Image: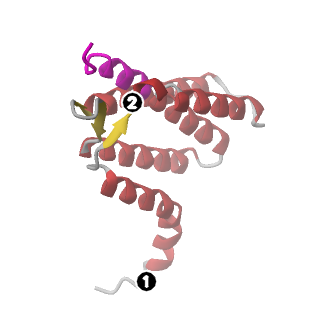
Amino acid sequence: MDFAPIMPQVIPFLKPLAIPVAVIIIIALRAHREYRLRPGRLWIAPAIVTALIGTTLYLAPHPPFDTTAYAAMLLSAASGFYFGVWQANETVLRHDPVRGWIMARSSSVAVLVLAAAVFLRFSARRLLGENAALTSDMSLLFALGLILALRVVLWRRTRGLVPA
């Protein structure tokens, strides 16, 4: 089969996905590696991300949004929160009695959730077209909800792992 005639139309369509797909591949390759989880430091990333995203949303110039746009942003934040809770519950945690550490390992499902989020963002950008500010804000709120939920649920799950 000769793909030469359709390649000029396919390449511009796939070009924006090149970097996210590469990042997802790297994350998928590292997903099964176990790492040390420090419950006392789980608050740092949400604090930094909340400050950065909050500042970005406040200072970014964009046209006034209507009720539908605010509903879409709320739905985006809520779905990010839901996926963060789901990802945290799919993370495998164990207590290493020799070192006294809490070890964590991401599941393959977490990588699939990340890939689905990238696909949804790409689809939203295609559907909303010229409203790039709304798509950008929705993506930021999705990420904020995901990170906050992931860290809070992981912190709550680690409380029962450390022996007294």
Query: Which residue is found at the position 75% from the left and 34% from the top?
Result: 63
Question: Magenta segment range?
Answer: 149-164
Q: Which is more N-terminal, label 2 or label 1? A: 1
Locate residue 70, reporting x and y percent: 60, 24
Q: Amino acid at mark 2?
A: Gly
Query: Which residue is found at the position 37% from the left and 49% from the top?
Result: 115
Residue that carries the numbered disc 1 in the rendered image: 5
Residue that carries the numbered disc 2 in the rendered image: 84
Q: Kindly check if marks 1 and 2 are in contact, taking CB atoms under 8 A apart as contact.
A: no
SS at mark 1 in the image? loop
Task: Give neighbour class at mark 2: few <14, some 14-19, many 20+ (Cα, 10 Å).
Answer: many
Distance Cα–Cα, label 1 vs label 2: 42 Å
Q: Residue 99 got which mark?
A: none
Total marks shown come to 2
State the residue lying farthest toward the top. Answer: 164
SS at mark 2 in the image? helix
Query: Which residue is found at the position 67% from the left and 40% from the top?
Result: 133
In-front residue for pair 95/115:
95
Q: Is residue 106 magenta?
A: no
Q: Is residue 28 left or right of residue 62?
A: left
Locate residue 1, reporting x and y percent: 28, 85
Q: Amino acid at mark 1?
A: Pro
Magenta span: chief secondary structure = helix
In the rendered image, the vertical position of residue 13 relative to residue 146, given as above or below: below
The picture quadrant where one finds residue 54 is top right
